[in-house]
Image (cartoon, rainbow, N blue to C red):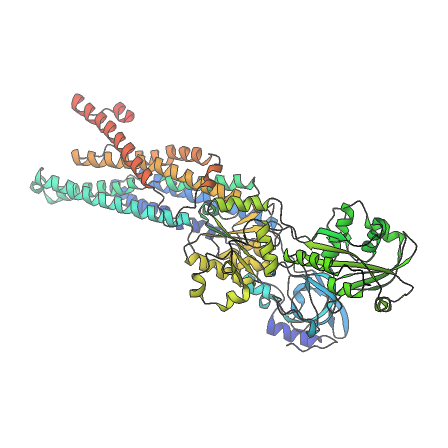
Amino acid sequence: MIAYNPRGLAPQEVAASRERHGDNVITPPKDASAWLLLLDKFRDPIIRILLLAAVLSLVIGFIHRDFTESIGIICAIILATCVGFWFEWDAQRRFRRLNQVNDDIPVKVMRDGAIREIPRREVVVGDVVYIESGETVPADGELVEAVSLKINESTLTGEPEVDKTVDEAHFDPEATYPSNVVMRGTTVADGYGVLVVTAVGDGTEAGRVTEQSTVQNDEPTPLDRQLTRLSQLIGRIGIGLSILIFCVMVGKALFFGDLLQQDWLTISQQVLHIFMVSVAIIVMSVPEGLPMSITLSLAMSMRRMLKTNNLVRKMHACETMGAVTVICTDKTGTLTQNKMHVQELVRYDALPEHDFAEVVALNSTAFLDAEGRIIGNPTEGALLEWLRGRGEEYEPLRRGASIVDRLTFSTERKYMATIIESGVSGRRLLCVKGAPEIVRGMCEADGLDAEVSARLLDFQNHAMRTLAIAWAETSETDCLRAVAAGGLRFSAVAAILDPVREDVPAAVRQCLDAGIGVKIVTGDTPATAREIARQIGLWDDARDTERNHITGAEFAAASDEELLERVQELKIMSRARPLDKQRLVRLLQQRGEVVAVTGDGTNDAPALNFANVGLSMGSGTSVAKDASDITLLDDSFASIATAVMWGRSLYRNIQRFVLFQLTINFAAILICFVGALVGTDMPLTVVQILWVNIIMDTFAAMAMASLPPSAEVMRDRPRRRDEFIISPGMARTIFTCGGAMVVVLLGMLFAWTFSQGGLTIRQLTLF
């Protein structure tokens, strides 16, 4: 507990606090430098095997004084790495323009007995800070005063409106953060508060979350794993063939030639020639055009996905989306609109519509701007939107009436009251709205108790917030005395919720049909989380049980071993704290899942960073976007399903190219193998193989990469994590088609050789 001094900190105390706790700046994630981004391209397993081939080729080049082959391989490496580097660097520059952070926002603090405004970065631990409606909380702190204070914690917990109080009797035991504590980055939805700063910068909850969002994640992408296996296979085959050729050719020279009869210099030259032929086989076995083709496919997909509102920041994320087996999504702002909306309003009295509209409009401090956005309390703003939807504008009603007295909402009272001089009827009215159980107790008997209770229970079972509205004629000028007099008329009950985005249920259904599990991770209450899951088609009361739902407290208390048995069955985690989602991602990955995470808040950043693919919202916090691989510019969950379709289609295109190139390489190596055994030179040189692999195959790669995504891939199940990129069907095609090509080409060679006694340049060109 930091000591509270109403006069604030003295200058020397500010300096001491800054020295001890630091500035109120969260260390931003460092962008990878251009050199590091370029070097990262050399981690590609196929590029590494190409580098080995380049070294071997250089050795041969120094012996023969001919570096044509080496230059060709090096050009292939440069092209593949530079294209990938350029597209990721360009995406990073676009992202930086989208995402800017400002620590110079003015904050009101008490310093040395005087109120002053300072930049947010200069706030220190121990400062007394004043916050009011619409402002952002500059640092973590403990409240010493709270008047009708409501905090929008959606960036940390997903909850758009949380009551805060300093009265322990009204603390919420289920709250994610204590009722007298406010966190950096949250905003004041309503009311006024005074806090003593307890943590700044990296020491705040937002700072700890940001730190986890920048920890290096070494989880390889599914495509990296596939290419590593492919490179290992190619390497083993190439080395095996080269050893076999070396042994066979040396044996042939020993037993069928006159090698032993030669002098040592001639023997050394022939053995060296055989060795170089063997090394050339290794070089030929490497599909030099493959890295270039995959890079082109990923790069073209990056650009084309941008047109579908997917800003891809990391190239491999394009393909990884196609391998996703689980999507962990937050609720607020992703599944829902992050905007309170009156779902239903039930009237219980005969007050004329225009009079009722005046009661609602005057007993409110919210506004709607020119675009219809809510300014002020989200719940009050939802009522104003409801009025506008019924053709009643609140501004003329407010101008036509006058306010006599007002009692703002507080956590302790649980209601708001306003006395007005009506501009509609000319009467003096007491207008009250608040918690239904409180407002009902102020009203005169009307025989509606059973009906109202049933209606409220139904609304609450559907996770809706409920608000009661009542009124009475009065002669009082003081709200407290008017309320104490009682006799109010119960007028209406409003059911308010954050509605599900219209396109979400269809997108969730598309993901489920594609075999992808969807899990909701939210800071909201269990009832609210289950209702949203029910609305989007994820939760079925008849089928799902408590085993499919867990709270953050239960999740934190359970061991990894206990959770590993249950984690794949979970559909909902409610009351989750920021690092719970990260732990969930880790556990799912341990179970072999490929995990995508969606989120827009600071609380989502660690999970976005550690997921196989992190998807942030375009309107989300800078911390979330920094930690993500893809930013959804339209904030739509439907764009996730589109990204999955792109990823799966891209993987199919890559498989098509692998099939195309390995068939050619198989045929070329087999021809060279047979040619080397029959004669002393290979029918194809390394340069000719490079020409086929780099020039011809690159155009084929571009053609295959440009194939449009196919919706039919969404009917498939996700591919297995250990599934090899070369399927059994592809292997059969490689051997059969490659074998047929070998038979035809060798037939041409032998026919020309035996009929004409040798090969002409024209025939080799045709070959």
Which of 689 and 208 lies nearest the eye of the viewer? 208
Where's residue 259, x and y in %? 10, 40
Which of 123 and 136 lies nearest the eye of the viewer? 136
Where's residue 175, x and y in %? 62, 66
Where's residue 633, x and y in %? 59, 46
Quadrant where the C terminus is found in the figure? top left
Quadrant where the N terminus is found in the figure? bottom right
Is 243 situated left or right of 26 in this image? left
Residue 368 can be seen in this image? no
Quarter where residue 746 is shown: top left
Numbered marks: total: 0
Quarter where residue 54 is shown: top left
Where's residue 223, x and y in %? 41, 47
Which of 7 and 539 lies nearest the eye of the viewer? 539
- Look at the picture and state if 591 lies above or below 742: below
Which of 705 and 429 lies nearest the eye of the viewer? 429
* Residue drawn at x 90%, y 65% as measured from the top left: 477
* Residue drawn at x 75%, y 49% as measured from the top left: 386
* Residue drawn at x 57%, y 47% as measured from the top left: 637
Is 525 situated left or right of 300 in this image? right
* Residue drawn at x 53%, y 63% as measured from the top left: 579
Outermost residue toward the left in this view? 261
Residue 302 can be seen in this image? yes
